[in-house]
Amino acid sequence: MLLSFGRPAGSTVAIANSAFVDGNAQVLINGRPGSTARFPWPSGPQTTATNIIITVTFPYAIVPRLVGAMNTTLPPGTLFTMQWKRPADGAYGYGAVTERVVQKPRGERVVWRGLSAGLDPCIGVQYVINNDVYGVASIPAGSLQDLGELWQGPGIKLIAVPEFTEKYDDPSVADLSDWMQAWSRQKTSRRILTLTPTVLQESQVYSGGMEQGYDFESLIAQIDGGQRSVIVPRHTDASGAYSAALTNRTARFGYLSQAATNKHLSGLFYGPGEWEHKEIPIPT
């Protein structure tokens, strides 16, 4: 599993080649993918090189591990390029990766991309969005487009015991009236992931023995208290290679809803308790 957390608070958002209609770019990093920022697609002749650029600048450097965008009206297949800037760089371009908008079974449109471990610390990311829908410039000039949430965060590979559980929590209501007439109130369901991290050694609990110098205590400090995080249960295929399809289908943006516990087993070994991570659903 890939667990991403610690999106820098106090970041700023800017757009080039367009403008946000409501002028409130910060909704893109407010932790609520249902609130959207609207922008017009550039006017004039369209080619696959026509683009807009959204830049998120951090108040301090992070080592990125996962990047994504949620709740967009851009058509499935729209090309995103995510590129980074290190403190000493004069321009964006470091660690550039490309991904296309994916439409999930309930209609949500997302872009997720896991990154290699050990990248350099970065102070910002650019989302370059091209009018390239599977190689065709099919986004209409001047059309209004929405985007709900941008994610850019550090992360680690989280090892969990087999048999994690996905539950689909549907808050919709369906019933019959006194006169036996059917009525319903449909809402957006969300996924709840239940998992148990594997047994840890003492250094992994208290002394920075996890990936990138994290340990159990410092990790929990990044994800408790309703802080936003992203869990990607499956980001590699059966061969162990990175899978864009699995990453986009399984990534869920949400929060830790069941407090993590840690039990001393014996000697230098500890057994974490069950975690529950609730998705913040995208309205559909």
Image: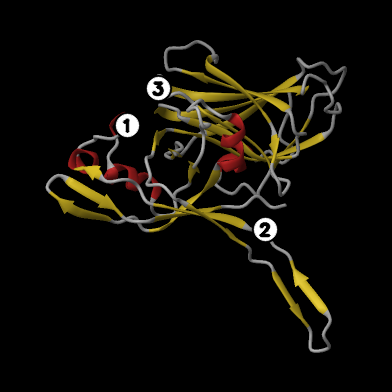
Residue sitting at the far front: 238
**Mark 1 or 2 closer to N-term?**
2
How far is mark 3 from mark 1, CA to CA? Answer: 15 Å
Q: How many marks?
A: 3
Residue sitting at the far bottom: 178
* Callout 3 secondary element: loop
State which quadrant residue 260 falls in.
bottom left
How far is mark 1 from mark 2, CA to CA? Answer: 35 Å
Q: Are marks 3 and 1 in contact (CB under 8 Å)?
A: no
Residue 223 coordinates in the image, percent (x, y): 40, 47
Vertical arrangement, residue 135 with respect to residue 176, above or below = above
Residue 63 coordinates in the image, percent (x, y): 41, 26
Name the foreground residue: 25 vs 116: 116
Residue sitting at the far left: 267
- Under mark 1, the amino acid is Glu
Q: Circle 1 sits on which residue?
A: 211
Crowdedness near tag 3: few (<14), some (14–19) or many (≥20) residues, C-alpha within 10 Å? some
- Under mark 3, the amino acid is Pro
Q: Is residue 71 left or right of residue 177?
A: left
Give the colour scheme of this rendering.
secondary structure
Q: Are marks 2 and 3 in contact (CB under 8 Å)?
A: no
**Mark 3 or 1 closer to N-term?**
3
Give me the residue at 32% from left, 45% from top. 198
Q: Circle 2 sits on which residue?
A: 188
Residue 86 coordinates in the image, percent (x, y): 45, 17
Q: Circle 3 sits on which residue?
A: 121
Vertical arrangement, residue 25 with respect to residue 161, above or below = above
